Image (spheres, rainbow, N blue to C red):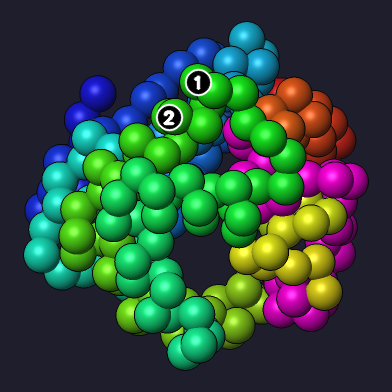
Amino acid sequence: MKLWANGNNLSYHDEGKGVPALVFLHHWGGSSRTSAGVRQRLSAKYRTVALDFRGWGESDAPEEGYSIVDMTNDVQRRAMLGAYDDAASAAGALDHVLTAEPLTGELRQQAIEDSLRGAPQAKRAWPTSGRAEDVAADIARIDVPTIVITGELDKVDPVPILQRDVVERIRGTRLEILRGAGHLLPVERPADLAESIGRFVARNVAS
């Protein structure tokens, strides 16, 4: 399905019924397909919505408008700019940075395809500008029940960084760590992630 928003057609999946609606956003290099395994486990009870950010998946790819508001490390930027240039570089990023556990052949191929399909301007946006944006003030304004779920071996957003920059800024939030997992929890641990989300929603949101 397509949604017209801010001058672009955005592709999205809307499945299931019930309250609340759970919205899934993908990582830089992914698509709405990234969360499919999690959504399949939750859509029997909840409405699940997942979209392709502009420039990724089946969404439109404008020439600009890829900041965090629209949708830092200087040492990492040069490598990140070429992270999704070809299948080998995408596979390297997937195997050595994004995941801590081997993916099945089908899921690994899907993740590589999603990374390669991104528009050039979308690929450039995160390493050149997105990572440098300061959203600390916005994070501190969150005043709804919140849980942060991460992988123990996440190399993109390590646990100590998440604890300092996210968990400690949101009053009453809780950090849940999945042992042995990396950054891409929706494809590494879809069942565990779905269970954690379902448990959190059941405790904090009235049906």
Q: Quadrant of residue 181?
A: top right
x, y (%) of residue 185?
67, 41
In percent of the image, x 50 and y 20: which residue is there? 106
Would you say residue 112 sits in the magenta stretch?
A: no
Q: The N terminus lies in which quarter of the figure?
A: top left
Q: Is residue 49 above or below residue 136?
A: above
How many numbered circles does the render carry? 2
Q: Which residue is mark 2?
A: 110
Q: Is residue 147 visible?
A: no
Q: Magenta part of the protein: which range? A: 161-187
Q: Amino acid at mark 2?
A: Gln
**Mark 1 crowd level (few <14, some 14–19, many ≥20, 10 Å Cα):** few
**Mark 2 crowd level (few <14, some 14–19, many ≥20, 10 Å Cα):** some
Q: Is residue 26 above or below residue 14?
A: below
x, y (%) of residue 192?
79, 30
Measure the C-alpha gap from mark 1 to mark 2. 6 Å
Q: Secondary structure at mark 2?
A: helix
Q: Nearer the viewer, residue 112 or 162?
A: 112
Q: Quadrant of residue 28?
A: bottom left
Q: Are marks 1 and 2 in contact (CB under 8 Å)?
A: yes
Q: Nearer the viewer, residue 174 or 58?
A: 58
- Left or right side of 176 for 20: left
x, y (%) of residue 60?
15, 45
- Left or right side of 17 for 78: left
Would you say residue 175 sits in the magenta stretch?
A: yes
